[in-house]
Amino acid sequence: MSFDTPEWAGRHHYFHHSNPRSGDRAKKLFEKVHVRPAIDNAFKILEDPKAHSVDVEAAQLTLDIFRNTNRVGAAASAGRAVQDGCDLALIPDPEYHQTLSLREAQLVAKENLKLHKVQNWNAEVEAADKEKLDQYLEEIDNVVENAVIGLREAMARDNKIIGEIDLRDPLSGNQLPHLTMPDYGRRGDLKTKWSTPATNSKGERTWRKGSLPSSLLHEFAIANLFQVAGFWALNGQQTPFLVYANKDDYRVYTPDNTPELKPDTLKDIVKEIQAHHKVTENILKAAQTKEDLFGLVTPDFTKIYWKNSPAYVREAKKLWGME
């Protein structure tokens, strides 16, 4: 479905909303209003054979700050690789109508994870991300297997397994569309949990297993709950599910075993999302310039979603006059 973007949103390059629990409002505005247009403009300059050398140099610096600093950590790359493997094991190829065996899917997932570009904005970050990558390459076969089992359980009654799609439509009371992407079945998502480094009582380096959430109200799962509430709001209120998998086990959450996924609770969450988006739209309408816009929100740089390269964070702090 196509949308005519209102002038007040277009002037800020803000075209859709997303899960409000995946980052604070300031971070989302920074990404959509500043980072993405800056990247697009940099590519245009680099593709222009008549561009001045000074502009080319500035464009390359922009890409180095916002795009080429290996912003994605090993855990995120591992999660993406697991989903690739699950797709191959569960969704028939459109041409040959066949799936890969579990072992074949595991091999592809591992090869995809090997392509991860280690975060490298300083030596400490590079060493930590490389250590995690090595560990996750050891775990990924088991995570893929557990994820496949969990997804099959969650979609046991589906006539056909559908992979990741875009759902994009305004929620009630909002003018801009809410964009969300369910991984499977138009209604469910896969989440992977990976081991984290730790030190035991003897001072030895160990790994603590990535834990599966005991409740979707846990601080590290609430964003996932809001995510599937968005699915539910845009897909005709189909029964949602969440599958979590680590190297040892999996867990499937559905309305049958999770009160938070029942319609009444989802309805309340969607109302909260709508209200959040309404405030964002009012801010966009009130601000005539980018400077006005960033003067209406305050970032919290201590939150995990602001964890990035020093150059990236420095650019954000400049916009808020904090650098």
Image: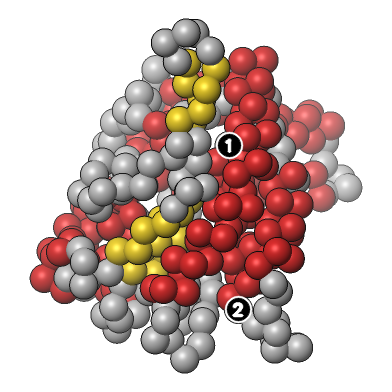
Residue 10 seen in the figure: no
Along the horizontal axis of the image, is 38 left or right of 160? right
Rendered view: 267 above or below 124: below
For disc 1, the marked residue is 73
Residue at image position (41%, 36%) is 305
Q: What is the x, y in percent for residue 299? A: 33, 30
Q: CA distance from mark 2 to mark 1?
A: 27 Å
| Mark with earlier residue (2, 1) | 1
For disc 2, the marked residue is 91
Along the horizontal axis of the image, is 44 left or right of 175? right
Q: What is the x, y in percent for residue 273? A: 23, 59
| Amino acid type indicated by mark 2 | Ile
Quadrant of the drawing holding the C terminus: top left
Snapshot quadrant of residue 86: bottom right
| Amino acid type indicated by mark 1 | Gly
Residue at image position (69%, 47%) is 113
The colour style of the image is secondary structure
